[in-house]
Image: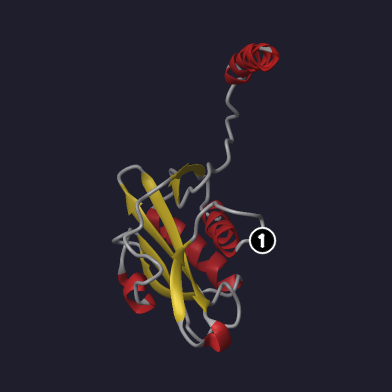
Amino acid sequence: MRNHWIAAVLSVLLGLAHPAAAQQPLRADAGPTSRANVILVTTTAQPEVVVAALSEYLKFNGFAVDTLDAARGLVTTHALEEGQTLAEQTKIRAVRGANGWRLTGLYLMGGPLNSGFTAFSAMFLGLDGAPSKVAFRQVEAAARAIPGGSLRYDRAKVRFGAFTKWEDALKMPW
């Protein structure tokens, strides 16, 4: 009987505290939500300017730039199996769409003694030092290099998994 009374008091207290938290105003610069793996950037800059800014940022930070196409609105980096840094083992893809630019990323992680690689999507998940979050922060930093851009975060279904060959995963847009 006593435990039921304590449980009732706790549920009332938690119920009263919960609506107060929900009434707080949202921040204008809300950060990524858990498991976010897509960054949407809205900008008024011309595609040529965006491609040039992304290219400069990516090259300066050690990425192997693969595709630069302002006409199609496409920027990609190449993930190197023999890469020594996370930037060299990360593929960033920026595509211009109707609502702005969509940036995604994936990174390669090698097995013991680099015996086999697996591709994982860069997402906002885990501890700050987790490879997925570190790779996501690299994609986010590239998104911030877009001039005059405002960032939003989203989640998309990834069409590859841990058992997908990394070569095939690198070819899949998502």
Kind of residue at disc 1: Gly
Residue at point 53% right, 86% down?
114
One can see residue 42 in this view? no
- Where residue 156 appears, as percent x and y from the top left, is 37, 49
- Where residue 94 appears, as percent x and y from the top left, is 41, 59
Task: Report the label total.
Answer: 1
Query: Where is 153 relative to 2, above or below?
Result: below
Q: Which residue is mark 1?
A: 129
Quarter-of-image position of residue 131: bottom right
| In-image side of 108 versus 171 (left or right) | right
- Which image quarter holds the C terminus? bottom left
Query: Where is 25 relative to 16, above or below?
Result: below
| In-image side of 124 versus 65 (left or right) | right
Quarter-of-image position of residue 166: bottom left
Residue at point 43% right, 46% down?
40
Number of residues whose C-alpha sits closer than 10 Å to that of mark 1, classed few (under 14), some (14–19) or many (20 or more): few
One can see residue 115 in this view? yes
Query: Where is 21 relative to 70, above or below?
Result: above
- Where residue 19 appears, as percent x and y from the top left, is 59, 15
- Which image quarter holds the N terminus? top right
| In-image side of 69 versus 8 (left or right) | left
Q: Nearer the viewer, residue 44 or 7?
A: 7
- Where residue 113 appears, as percent x and y from the top left, is 57, 88
Q: Nearer the viewer, residue 14 or 68?
A: 14
Q: Which color mode does the image show?
A: secondary structure
Q: Nearer the viewer, residue 103 or 118?
A: 118
* Label 1 residue SS: loop
Residue at point 34% right, 64% down?
160
